[in-house]
Image (tube, rainbow, N blue to C red):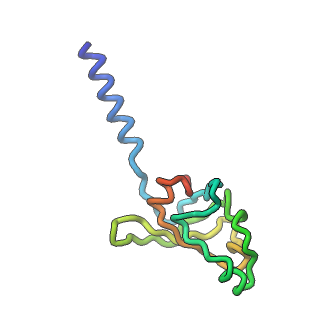
Amino acid sequence: MKKRLFIAVFSFFAFLAQAQDKEIKLGDVLKINNIPEATFQHIELPKKNIIIKRGGVPDYKTVHNNEVVVTKLTTNHEGEQMATLKRKDGRNFFVSFPSITANVTRAIAEEEISY
């Protein structure tokens, strides 16, 4: 009985150690997931009128399933990581925005972004 309890506790802590959040580093490649609501809450995308004013195409579906590279990292006052993201293929978001910003800590928790 003691062996089973020991194994259960040991496996729980091993699983817990793996489940902890990984730190994002410069140059990491992330994927923007396809979410059903089509409104990202933790990825800061420009509004439609701003995209049109800058000569872009306001199609938010073009953001889904893109691989992005972390180019700049900062930490906000709450201790969460904020990142500047650029597309891995070198193209601009909405034809006119070279980068976007995101709260990476919350975006990963809400599954807007994945590794």
Q: Quadrant of residue 23?
A: bottom left
Q: Residue furthest left?
A: 2
Q: Residue furthest top?
A: 1
Quadrant of the snapshot with the N terminus? top left
Position above or below: 48 against 20:
below
From the top left corner, tell me how far across and down residue 111 is, in percent.
54, 52
User: In this image, 28 relative to 63: left or right?
Assistant: left
Q: Residue furthest bottom?
A: 53
Residue depicted at 48% across the width and 62% down the height: 104
Position above or below: 96 against 77:
below
User: In this image, 70 relative to 3: left or right?
Assistant: right
From the top left corner, tell me how far across and down residue 29 is, in percent.
57, 59
From the top left corner, tell me how far across and down residue 72 is, in percent.
49, 72
Residue depicted at 64% across the width and 60% down the height: 38
Number of dots carrying numbers = 0
Residue depicted at 64% across the width and 53% down the height: 36
From the top left corner, tell me how far across and down residue 101 is, in percent.
53, 72
Q: Residue furthest front?
A: 37
Q: Quadrant of residue 94?
A: bottom right
Residue depicted at 60% across the width and 72% down the height: 45
User: In this image, 27 relative to 8: left or right?
Assistant: right
Q: Quadrant of residue 75?
A: bottom left
